[in-house]
Amino acid sequence: MNRQGKRALLLVIAILVLQCSLQAQSQSSDSTSLREGTWALQFGIAGNFTLSTFQGSTLGAKYQLSERSAIRGGFTINGNTNDGTSSYSGSTNDTSNGTAAGSNSTKAATVSFQVQYVWYMNPSGPVHFYAALGPSASYSYSKNSSNYPYLYRVTDNGSTRGYWEQELYGSSTTQWGAGVGGAVGVEWFACRWLSLHADYGEIIQYRWGSNSSSQNYPAPTIPGEIPWQTSSSGTTKGWTLTSAAVAFGLNVYL
């Protein structure tokens, strides 16, 4: 988002908050949307007051079970795929050996999910303190492959010749995670349908996964050389504790 867009968004948020504040003055102090059956969309407030994802979620929402409790959750889906080609040139004894083509490919995907039960400690009034706790899960996958040409120099009877050889590389990693996330925060209602909140969260997860890699020298052209291949694989597991910085957000109640 450019600078003008950020200023426009900041102005819109400021106008909404001011309008809500003026409306709230004509209403009772406990006029909020913390009522059973109410839905809210959750957005994060990033630097320069731009709206972003909340708690890293692509989509975040909250449902009020009562004035003292709610369920909030979100999920995130990220992915990318990239394919590229390159051309290599080389020479032997100032004699050009032409060019050879190379390629590379990258694929990655990440999915995470989090649900939390929210307790409101003081449901009355415009400012509410809350605590949240619930399960979290994650999955990530990445795969890389490449084909690189190498120019080998071979000396035979005083004559040096060049040979283009292809070497193939590949690697993949898969990881799962499951754990619990918690947060404490405060929510302030500018009016019945709009609130601002800030909370601090922690997530502890047990993560496990697998990884593999290979290097392949499939069809050598150098006299006397033979094909070869190496590969490796392994597993990982362990606990991780992730501390999130204070997150500022905006709730729009439906």
Image: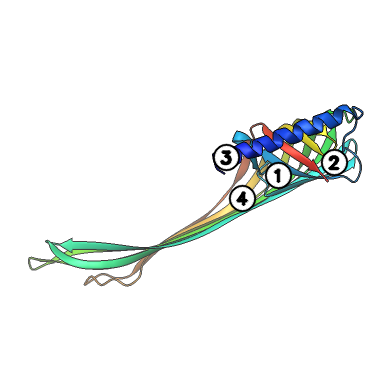
Q: Which of marks 3 and 2 is nearer the N terminus?
A: 3
Measured in 3D between alpha carbons, the distance from the residue under mark 3 to the one under mark 2, in whole angstroms, is 37 Å
Q: What element carries label 4?
A: strand
Which residue occupies the extreme left position in the image?
158
Question: Can see residue 108?
Answer: no
Q: What element carries label 2?
A: strand
Q: Which of marks 3 and 4 is in front?
A: 3
Label 1, on which residue?
179
* Identity, as a three-letter code, of the amino acid under mark 4: Trp
* Identity, as a three-letter code, of the amino acid under mark 3: Gln
Q: Which of marks 1 and 2 is in front?
A: 2
User: Horizontal and vertical percent for residue 76?
Assistant: 66, 51
Q: Which of marks 3 and 1 is in front?
A: 3
Measured in 3D between alpha carbons, the distance from the residue under mark 4 to the one under mark 2, in whole angstroms, is 31 Å
Q: Which of marks 1 and 2 is nearer the N terminus?
A: 2
* Identity, as a three-letter code, of the amino acid under mark 1: Gly
Label 3, on which residue?
4
Q: Is mark 1 on a helix, strand or loop?
A: strand
Residue 67, quarter of the rendered image: top right
* 118 displayed left or right of 106: right
Label 4, on which residue?
208
Say which residue appears at 86% left-offset and 30% top-offset: 24
For residue 70, which numbered disc appears in the image? 2
* 240 displayed left or right of 24: left
